[in-house]
């Protein structure tokens, strides 16, 4: 691997826990960054050591609130003005990704706006994981290394040694992701067909496929209020499923999510640590993606392919 002096890793406030684990895996120290906050909520970013001529990797997920995105933009701008050689944004969870198209008149496409903001700030590369829609990579004019949480979730599912396994998608839109898991594990796929009354509110849901006597694992990219995932789990249990688990890349878990998960038929719900989860919910298990991101950073530094990091 390249000399540790050629690159540096820094972290924003919200993702420091993950950046520390990434640095531990890389065998390098976490860079010194100061964020000064003013009483009106404004803040300023400054690097506390020289980054001139270095490849800098800025670790920050852009989950709410918006300060996390603004921190990342200021980190990129400060690095550009401090003469960093390359600026690489490591964004384990890319927020606003659900706004990837105009699904009705007169709405914003937030994912494209965020991509433009990052580009204008001066980013040279983005490393992210499980975008809500793969086509968001095309919103950027810089290279995007798109990692997959399947690299840590699939080994965990295999370790459970579940008989009569069935993979399920909570909606038709996630069928491609779920089908990838089903193919890798050599098991059937079932789908849930849902309609929404409004954002975060599911009106109706039907199962397409047989779950009777099966151990079901629902695959999704994120869980926000947990309305969809818990409703799917309850319906599958009503239709004769032996056990129901859920796996999702990003642990948004806002509002009533924890209470819904605890009250549902779910045995457990598995996430990565792309977003911190501090609420007390015994059914939640988090798997770390720090080693996966560390290896991606190594390969970017050494100009090596990252494609063989993908299990599925």
Image (cartoon, rainbow, N blue to C red):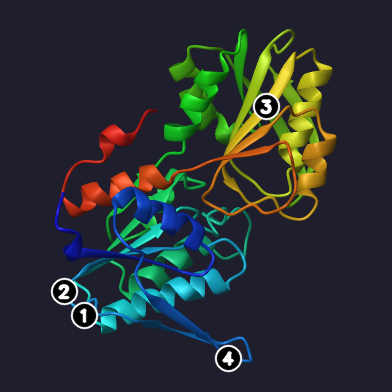
* Residue 137 seen in the figure: yes
SS at badge 1: loop
Name the residue located 20 percent from the left edge and 41 percent from the top edge.
Answer: 305
Task: Give left or right: position of 307 versus 156.
Answer: left
Q: Earlier in the sequence, mark 1 or mark 3?
A: 1
Q: Are marks 2 and 1 in contact (CB under 8 Å)?
A: yes
Q: Residue at x 58, y 38 (%)?
A: 248
Helix, strand or loop under label 3: strand
Label 4, label 1: how many angstroms apart (C-alpha)? 26 Å
Q: Is residue 37 above or below residue 22?
A: below
- Decide which of 149, 3 is in the foreground and name it: 3
Q: Which mark is residue 245?
A: 3
Residue 33 percent location from the top left of the image: 40, 76
Circle 4 sits on which residue?
38
| Residue 289 picture location, percent across and down | 45, 44
Residue 51 placement: quadrant: bottom left
Q: Earlier in the sequence, mark 2 or mark 3?
A: 2
Q: Residues within 10 Å of mark 4 (few under 14, many from 20)?
A: few
User: In whole angstroms, how far apart are the C-alphas of marks 2 and 1?
Assistant: 6 Å
Tell me the mark number nearer the camera, choosing from 4 and 3.
Answer: 4
Residue 250: x %, y % from top left: 57, 46
Alpha-carbon distance for marks 1 and 3? 48 Å
Circle 2 sits on which residue? 53
- The reply to whether dot 2 and dot 4 touch (C-beta < 8 Å) is no
Q: CA distance from mark 4 to mark 3?
A: 44 Å
- The residue to which callout 1 is attached is 83
Q: Left or right of 281: which side holds 140? A: left
């Amino acid at each position: 691997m390249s000399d540790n002096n050629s690159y540096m890793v820094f972290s924003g406030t919200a993702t420091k826990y993950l950046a520390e684990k990434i640095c531990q895996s890389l065998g390098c120290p976490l860079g010194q960054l100061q964020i000064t906050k003013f009483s009106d909520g404004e803040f300023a970013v400054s690097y506390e050591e020289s980054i001139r001529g270095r490849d800098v990797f800025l670790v920050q997920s852009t989950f709410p609130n918006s300060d996390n995105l603004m921190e990342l933009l200021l980190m990129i701008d400060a690095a550009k003005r401090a003469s960093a050689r390359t600026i690489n944004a490591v964004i384990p969870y890319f927020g606003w990704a659900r706004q990837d198209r105009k699904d009705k008149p007169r709405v914003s496409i937030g994912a494209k706006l965020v991509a433009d903001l990052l580009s204008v700030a001066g980013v040279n590369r983005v490393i992210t994981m499980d975008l809500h829609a793969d086509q968001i990579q095309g919103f950027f004019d810089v290279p995007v290394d798109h990692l997959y949480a399947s690299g840590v979730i699939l080994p965990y599912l295999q370790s459970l040694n579940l008989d009569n396994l069935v993979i399920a998608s909570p909606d038709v839109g996630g069928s491609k992701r779920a089908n990838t898991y089903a193919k890798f594990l050599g098991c059937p796929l079932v789908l849930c067909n849902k309609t929404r009354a409004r954002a975060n509110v599911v009106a109706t849901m039907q199962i397409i496929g047989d779950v009777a006597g099966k151990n079901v694992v629902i695959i999704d990219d994120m869980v926000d209020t947990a309305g969809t995932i818990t409703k799917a789990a309850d319906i599958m249990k009503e239709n004769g499923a032996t056990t129901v688990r859920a796996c999702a890349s990003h642990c948004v878990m806002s509002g009533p999510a924890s209470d819904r998960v605890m009250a549902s038929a779910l045995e457990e719900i598995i996430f990565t640590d792309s977003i911190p989860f501090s609420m007390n919910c015994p059914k939640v298990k988090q798997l770390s993606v720090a080693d996966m991101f560390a290896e991606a950073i190594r390969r970017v530094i050494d100009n090596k392919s990252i494609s063989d990091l993908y299990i599925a």
